[in-house]
Amino acid sequence: MTVLMTNLFRKMAAHATAVAGLTLLVGCSSSSQELARARAIGVVRVDQGPLEQGTIRFVPIDGTKGPMTTATISEGMFDIPAEYGPLIGKHRVEIEATDPNGFAPDDEEAAQKWIAMGRPRLAGIRIPLVYNQKSTLRAEILPGDENWMEFDLVVNDSQARK
């Protein structure tokens, strides 16, 4: 019985050591996988006035790897705390207005159904593609307390139709 108990004890000790080692590895790998983020705060103006409602996205580019960050714009302002903020690095910035008729900005099918029912299309701000889907806006997020940004968008009838 003693030999049997000794073998059982050795197996249990080996199993416990393996579990402890695996736990240590998992714990270490999760902390090394954390992504460095920073606060982003700023203003979005359309034709020199605040964008009443919309969304802003920070899409990593040029070697910045990780998920994009999306936030709400309200009365021209956005403020993303560091824990949810954009990754440190370079980003393409996409800005869209919240359409007051409830359709997604690119949902032309829903808009056409609305019009077909005899309802007028509600006037909303249409942000040109150069500021969202084909954005040329850029931002570099730096480590620190805040990254202040100002985006001045120019929207006129000829651009809004693009």
Image (cartoon, helix red, strand yellow):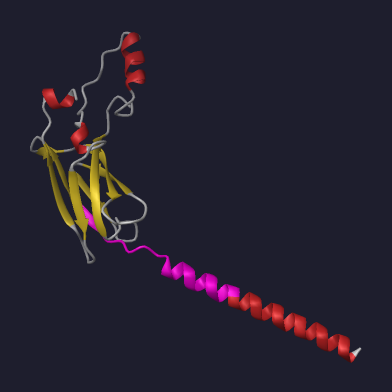
Q: Position of residue 7 (x, y in %)?
A: 82, 85
Q: Position of residue 127 (x, y in %)?
A: 20, 32
Q: Position of residue 49 (x, y in %)?
A: 10, 37
* Residues drawn in magenta: 22-41
Q: Quadrant of the C terminus?
A: top left
What's the residue at 36%, 20% (across, down)?
Answer: 110
Question: In the displayed structure, would residue 25 be above or below residue 91?
Answer: below
**Residue 146 falls in which quadrant of the image?**
bottom left
Q: Position of residue 156 (x, y in %)?
A: 11, 27
Kindly give the residue lying farthest to the front in the view shown: 63
The verdict on residue 25 being magenta is yes
Q: Is residue 31 left or right of residue 135?
A: right
Kindly give the residue lying farthest to the right in the view shown: 1
What's the residue at 26%, 36% (across, down)?
Answer: 133
Question: In the displayed structure, would residue 117 be above or below residue 12?
Answer: above
Viewer-side residue, 49 vs 18: 18
The verdict on residue 69 being magenta is no
**Residue 80 falls in which quadrant of the image?**
bottom left
